[in-house]
Image: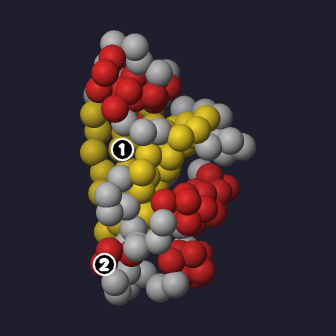
């Protein structure tokens, strides 16, 4: 059991290693001054996160990677985006399908940021991006950063 948990933890990548400062600067217009990693285990799910702090804090970028040893990440994805049990609550969240990114992807506009969710194999990624730009510009910027992160996953 312990060996299985250690193997799962090793399989969960450091979210801060999936994006580089120059990549973020090219998209957000500012270089991160700091990156703040985080980690938690939620049963069979291993969550690794990173906040890339920018000089203008509202422009900061947050990346979260959730992995599992079994099919838990995919089950979580189904709960989030395809569950009929959530009923009206699920319908109130204005999600937009994003083509050609991972196995499946959705953009959720949030105030004052937006979040891009991507499912790829046994990993669920969430990239939140801030800034004053319109939603479609945020999606384009989030998509550019997510492609970089997926390339390192």
Task: Please state which of the two labelled residues, at mark 2 or mark 1, is closer to the viewer.
Answer: 2
The mark total stands at: 2
What residue sits 58% from the left and 38% below the top? 97
Other-residue count near label 2 (Cα within 10 Å), few / some / many at <14 / 14–19 / ≥20: few
Identify the mark at residue 47; answer none if there is no mark. Answer: 1
Q: Is residue 146 above or below residue 88?
A: below
Location of residue 90 in the rendering, given as x and y in whole percent from the top left corner: 35, 26
Which residue sits furthest top? Answer: 85
* Residue 9 - label: none
Viewer-proximal residue, 61 or 153?
A: 61
**In what quadrant of the picture does the N terminus appear?**
top left
102, above or below 1, in the image: below
State the residue at coordinates (72%, 43%).
100
- Residue assigned mark 2: 57
Q: Is residue 97 left or right of residue 57?
A: right
Q: Is residue 86 left or right of residue 8?
A: left
Q: Position of residue 21 (x, y in %)?
A: 52, 79
| Side of 79 relative to 102 (left or right) | left
Q: Residue at x 33, y 17 (%)?
A: 87
Measured Cα–Cα span from mark 2 to mark 1: 23 Å
Give SS at disc 2.
helix
Element type at marker 1?
strand
């Amino acid at each position: 059991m312990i060996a299985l948990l250690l193997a799962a933890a090793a399989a969960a990548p450091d979210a801060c290693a999936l994006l580089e400062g120059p990549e973020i600067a090219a998209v957000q217009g500012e270089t991160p001054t700091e990156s703040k990693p985080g980690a938690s285990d939620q049963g069979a799910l291993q969550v690794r996160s990173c906040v890339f702090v920018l000089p203008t804090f509202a422009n900061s970028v947050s990346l979260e990677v959730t992995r599992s040893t079994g099919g838990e990440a995919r089950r979580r994805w189904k709960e989030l985006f395809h569950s009929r049990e959530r009923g009206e609550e699920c319908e109130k969240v204005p999600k937009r399908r994003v083509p050609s990114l991972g196995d499946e992807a959705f953009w959720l506009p949030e105030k004052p940021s937006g979040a891009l969710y991507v499912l790829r194999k046994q990993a669920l990624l969430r990239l939140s991006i801030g800034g004053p730009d319109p939603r479609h510009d945020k999606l384009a910027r989030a998509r550019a950063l997510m492609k970089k992160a997926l390339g390192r996953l």
